Amino acid sequence: MSSLLLLLLPLFILTPTTALEFRYHRNGEIEKYLHDISTSNPDIAHVYSIGRSVRGQQLWVLVLSLSPRHHSIGIPEFKYVANMHGNEVLGRVLLLQLIDDLVRGHRNKEAWSVQLLNSTRIHILPTMNPDGFDDAGTHCQFSQGRSNHNGVDLNRNFPDAFAGKRQQGQFVEETQEAEVRAVIGWLRSETFVLSANLHGGALVASYPYDNSNGGSEQVGGASVTPDNDVFVHLAKVYSYNHGSMHRGDSCKDGLSFNDGITNGYKWYALKGGMQDYNYVWAQCLEVTLEVSCCKFPPKDQLPALWTENREALLAFIRQVHLGVKGRVFDSFGVPVQNAVVEVKGRSNICLFRTDKYGEYYRLLLPGNYTFTVTYPGHQVLTETLDVPHGPDRYSALKHDFLLRRAAGNSTQYTPTEFSPTPTCNYTLNVEGGGGAVATPTWTGVSAALGLWAALRFLSD
């Protein structure tokens, strides 16, 4: 009997009823923890790697969802990334605690966790720069380990929308750092809707743009995106759900941020940043969360720092349900990829397009919005929608766009694409760690639309 208990002991240790220790786990320990969670909770958890660091360490991601191994139609993809700078370490702790909290909450059938995992597919990358962490010193502000093993700051290594055509045209993906290439590939494998990147050394929520070329995006010293209202809302959601970020001056370092938020460029210009890349090329709204005044907080402060950040982390995830989501169908009722879905008054550098499942997601605050949908061989479709607040219901407004085929001599609308760069990357949804698509949750609706479209086609 004692031998049997010894064999079963590891299983009891892995159950979500055991609290995760507050400390700085080594990279190997994080890898083991993520795999243990996946093995112990196969119905809601799945672990995969997006690539390797310069030293060859795997960049492990844990997915938490009711459908962890594959995308489900209508379920938005969300991600958290931490430890991009190897010496900014609190994010690693917060994301591990978040995993522990979500899994335990779901196992205990707590409504907040069940609703979140039923409605959202959450990807968590606890360390983007494991090599830097291995080299990191523990000084609060100044220490080694910020960069990767090649000495490159990963948050200056992404393609930049404002670099200009000549410079941008010289970008060769193979010359980027291994960790950056891994994230770029990750963004092509999933249609992420919302994201946050956890840093340290300040206490503020920063939002795009981080850079500018002095064009119309510059407003009052800031570099403003077409979705600035949404970004300000997202940043405030985190700062006001945080224990002290919203005060704006909690670090006592002379810096003051109104509401605990800032436009990235207005704070300081940054070329090659990850949040701008997410927004411009991957149509994923990402903010940068500076979550601790000290880059490497003392271990005894970790429980309190988790308490300060816990509700903010959860509230931010729920914002993935802002706005509108749905699919675009052609005249035969077939969902189409690369249909342009524009919102009047929001001229994005790279237009938002449907993914390979014909899906679109637009994060929008409550209000009336005019959508224009274009797809080759079909008439331009314009519709006005009244968008409610979705996060409280764990769902954005669901609305499908049904296109009509264009007459042979009809004039088709060409969408306006403001692009200071030569090309926009629409190569999305290459099969990656997330796996195949799940059986559509709107199957009945899609079938009905197909029949309706076929009948309409015969009458056209």
Image (cartoon, rainbow, N blue to C red):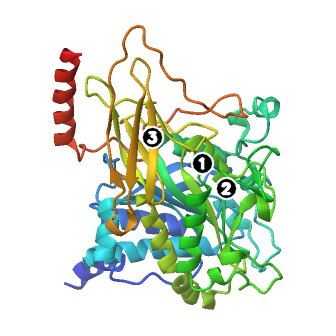
Residue at the (47%, 41%) spot, across then down: 189
State the SS at label 2.
Answer: loop
Q: Is residue 213 left or right of residue 406?
A: right
Q: Residue at x 57, y 62 (%)?
A: 196
Which residue lies at the image location 70% right of the left edge and 28% below the top edge?
422
Q: Which residue is mark 2?
A: 208
Q: What type is the residue that disc 2 sits on? A: Pro
* 2 or 3: mark nearer the eye: 3
Q: In the rendered image, which quarter contains the N terminus?
A: bottom left
View extreme (top): residue: 409
Q: Secondary structure at mark 1?
A: helix
Tell me whether circle 1 and circle 2 mark residues in contact (CB < 8 Å).
Answer: yes
Q: Quadrant of residue 198?
A: bottom right
Relative image position of residue 219 (x, y in whole percent): 76, 55
- Residue nearer the viewer, 348 or 387: 387
Cα gap from disc 2 to disc 3, whole angstroms: 23 Å
Q: Which mark is residue 279?
A: 1
Q: Secondary structure at mark 3?
A: strand
Judging by the rendered image, the residue that carries numbered circle 3 is 371
> Can you say whether 452 is above or below 12 in the image?
above
In the rendered structure, the answer to whether residue 163 lies left or right of residue 438 reads right
Residue 436 image label? none
**In the rendered image, which quarter is residue 207 located in?**
bottom right
Mark toward the viewer: 3 or 1: 3
